[in-house]
Image (spheres, helix red, strand yellow):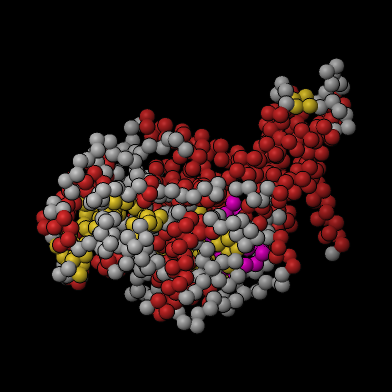
Amino acid sequence: MRGVRWRRAASQVGRSVAVWAVSTLTMLVLAGILPDFRLQSADGDSATTIAMTAAVGAGVFGVLSAVAWPLLVRLLLLVPALVLGLLVFFLNGSLLLLALRLNPSGQSEAAPETAVIVAAVMSAVASATGGALAVRDDDAYRRRLYRLADRRRRSDPACPATPGTVFLQLDGVGHDVLSAAVGKGLMPTVAKWLGRAPAADGGLRPSHRLTSWRTDWSSQTGASQLGILHGSNHDVPAFRWYEKDTGEVMVCNRPTSAAELQRRAVERTGDGGLLGADGASRGNLFGGGADEQALVLSIATRRRSRETRSRAGYFAYFSDPANAVRTALSFVAEVVREIAQSTRARLRKERPRVGRGGLYPFVRAFATVVERDVVVAAVTGDMLAGRTAVYADLVAYDEVAHHSGPLGRDTEQVLGRLDRALALLENVAEHAPRPYRIVVLSDHGQSPGETFRSRYGLTLGDLVRAGCGLPVPRRAERTHSGAEARAAVRAALRRPVEEGGGRHLPSGRRPEPLVLASGNLGLVSFPDVPHRMSKEEIDARHPGLLTTLANHPGIGFLLVRSEEHGGVVLGAFGAQIPLDDLDRTPGPLAAFGPGAADAVRRTHSFPHTADIMVNSFHDPADGEVLAFEEQIGSHGGLGGAQARPFLLSPLALSAPAGDDEELSGAEHVHRVLRRWLRESDGPQVPLETAPEERAA
């Protein structure tokens, strides 16, 4: 045993010396390149003196980074994560200036802006060198991973030997997209799990099964994740909707709305959520009842405290200066990549295409780099701390697909990087104090297609105004995209998500209708009428509105309340199908496939369903829809791949559904995940009465 310890110590010392030597060499090279950075006096020094100055400077900088950096991050823990990420370069440069000032030779100096560059390069080189030397050293790898673990768990009792479960959500990745990526070799880790690529020993043995499931009518993260984590997405008709009783526009990625939706779900089910027993929620809209939460939108408006901040997230990640610098450099690279890709698409005149300028490159970089790195690091810490259940959301694909389309080279690159994150977590599981089962799932897919405005030259709001006999503005107003990444950025900056449509309701005796878009799902409400209007009332008030909408070629169908039939689906050429007759005569719903009628009937029963629910046209041949927002990859309604997400589960767990059973709706997925947690025979999620029974 003593010999093993000596060998470990010698290995660690050897790597430290190698990193120090490479850092010294890097400092010498930079001193020769950068005019404002020198390691010798004005009169000149010998090569030996210069080398000694560089060696001492590199050593002092390394010690300061190891000792002072965690203290600085701890002091700045209340600073929003994105701001802290932007401070990385400044803090690192300050440490280098301090190291040069502490150098006994007293000959070295650097301009502040040059110090930032030198420190960034040295940190990146040191990180790369240390990582390369530790690739085949399991003990070193274990130590590097444990730096990300939650420090507060050290005094806790040993975790049980029963398996823990990690639920990793790949936001917006549809079943068909995942299958195609595996077939193209873009996701080797998933391919190995499915037995379509060789394992480490060369065999083809599947460890997971791939299952598709069907979303509710509102095929978006708010409805799906609320149902998955809390067991109920009742009364979530869309991504954004108007509630007449309060006069508020609810938006799923607004912190106040997310908190209210979570409260309603908990009240309806009588249960805290999927993660109530030793759980962690990372990067989600909702907490799921977890004690540990990081980048969770529903707590973004709360005052920062020990309960609402996660050291396994920001602190554990940014306390390593190499991690911080690597993320910052990757952030810049992603901004450049997006600018290059959007420029190429514009020069090639690709269609469909939407604008990708302004702040979007930075929003994309946050989603694909910062959010991914922090969430993966937090999950790593949770696994090494032995938590029972972890649920995390990676929004990278969803953000890119909205603007680049769900299929293509841009999104394929993102899928490859997500697969590498899965591989990392698989390696972490080998070093965790308990076995882990990794479940990968998505909340919805994305359907391709040009925007409604691009095809017809007007927005849904313009069409509604025309049907009401109101003047139509010449220039259509740009709609909100609703991407989750924007909410994550605003939450990181502690800035509330605002939606202009809900704050400026029209004034006058008869206010204009309020039109809101959620992907290819539109909602029309009349704010001055306190109840949900019926078809008969709408026809009496605006005789041409429903006919104008139903007969437009870009509209698939409408849902309205009927005084005679309770609820009806309207389509072109006067089609009017009562909800009770949809199974026999699907009418306009025929193009949307099986399950559409049930989804529409369920939404009709919600208290806050809009006066008119509008679903865009859908072409079953190519899966295209027409988004009412500026997105060429959209989700939110019925039609195409958006309604077919996936569930990738270990074979060690029971099958998600029976042979003749369809996995339908987010609440159904919630029940499956709860069952899997019970199968672990570990700390149990309370289920004296099933949530779905209490909600009935």
Q: Give, as a single range, the part of the protein colored magenta.
A: 374-393
Residue ranking furthest to the bottom: 688
**Left or right, residue 616 beside residue 396:** left
Left/right of residue 590 with respect to residue 176 in the rendered view: left
Q: Is residue 176 visible?
A: no
Q: Where is residue 431 in the image (x, y as percent from the top left)?
A: 67, 62
Residue 254's x, y, as percent? 45, 54
Quadrant in which the N terminus appears: bottom right
List the single residue furthest toward the front. 509
Locate residue 249, reporting x and y percent: 37, 55
x then y, percent, for residue 233? 40, 66
Looking at the rendered image, the quarter that the C terminus falls into is bottom left
Q: Is residue 31 above or below residue 275?
A: above
- Left or right of 399? Residue 28 is right
Res. 535 in view: yes
The residue depicted at 65 percent of the width and 74 percent of the height is 161
- Residue positioned most to the top: 43
Which one is in front, 606 or 142?
A: 606
Q: Is 380 included in the stretch rendered in magenta? A: yes
Q: Residue 66 lies in magenta, yes or no?
A: no
Residue at 32 percent of width and 49 percent of height: 505
Q: Is residue 287 above or below residue 39?
A: below
Identified at 37% across, 68% down, the residue is: 234
Q: In front here: 269 or 531?
A: 531
Where residue 100 sits, quadrant-wise, is top right
Residue at image point 85% right, 16% down? 43
- Asked if residue 290 lies left or right of residue 249, the reply is right
Compare residues 680 and 469 and report the one nearer the observer. 469
